[in-house]
Image (cartoon, helix red, strand yellow):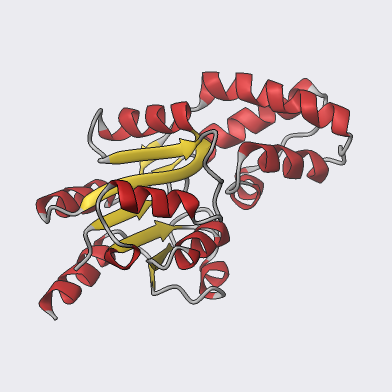
Amino acid sequence: MYKCCIFDLDGTLINTVYALTRTINLTLAHFGLDLIGYEETRVFVGDGYKNFVNRAFAFRGETSRQILEEAYEVYNRNFQENCLYRIEAYDGMKDLLAFLKKRQIKIAVLTNKGQRQAVENIETVFGQGYFDMITGEQEGLKRKPDPQGALYTAEALGALPSECLYLGDTNTDMRTGIAAGMDTVGVAWGFRKREELEQFHPAYIVSHPSEIMSILDARSAK
């Protein structure tokens, strides 16, 4: 039986595409560059804000290291002001989390978003103290797809990797969960296409949070 479910944040728990697109476009505009759309954001995010900035700026033809270093600072200022813009839980997610709590399965967040913004996002949508653990990007902890954060979370919550379900919506998440030795779930409602998830052969691919409840019911019936 699973003791813990570890969730990615952006594109898995919460739809943050509007906040992320708004933030990067304010940053691009600061440098006089053309804006990007939601589809580009969905492809460019997933492994830290610097990579997001790098990809968006390269997409608009800007690769100067000096400009990018300044852009990271501008992005962070913009993100502090816009990280909650139009964010919302995905359909069915709150029901799934309530189901997990009823089953006394620990729920945790592991994201490459900064720690402060991760906590702010989660607490705005789900309330303070709802999750057992929230782990964002922080000093001393390697970013996903390195499995360190997933293993750290499992240990802190008293679960073996084999007792954890790891859920995410990108190739970064698939690599993270699999490398951590956890049953990994690709969620097809997020930022990336189902085909990207299928390439990594996760334990499950689901199209709605309710399918996780069915997986857990089937597992507990064995």
Q: Residue furthest bottom?
A: 222
- Percent of width and height locating residue 212: 27, 64
- The reply, left or right, for residue 215 in relation to residue 200 is left
Q: Is residue 84 visible?
A: no
Residue 200 sits above or below residue 208 on the image: below
Quarter the N terminus occupies? bottom left
Instruction: Give residue 72's position: percent from left, percent from top.
Output: 71, 28
Q: Is residue 81 shown above or below 139?
A: above
Across and down, in percent, residue 90 comes to: 35, 47
Q: Would residue 21 be visible to someone looking at this image?
A: yes
- Taking the spot 47% from the left edge, 44% from the top edge, the residue there is 111
Q: Nearer the viewer, residue 102 or 183?
A: 183
Write down the quadrant of residue 68 in the picture: top right
Residue 93 located left or right of residue 196 = left
For the image, the number of numbered tags is 0
Residue at image point 63% right, 37% down: 49
**Quadrant (top left/top right/bottom left/bottom right) for the C terminus:** bottom left
Q: Nearer the viewer, residue 20 or 182?
A: 182
The structure residue drawn at horizontal position 53% and vertical position 58%, both measured from the top left corner, is 170
**Identity of the residue drawn at 71% across and 37% down:** 53
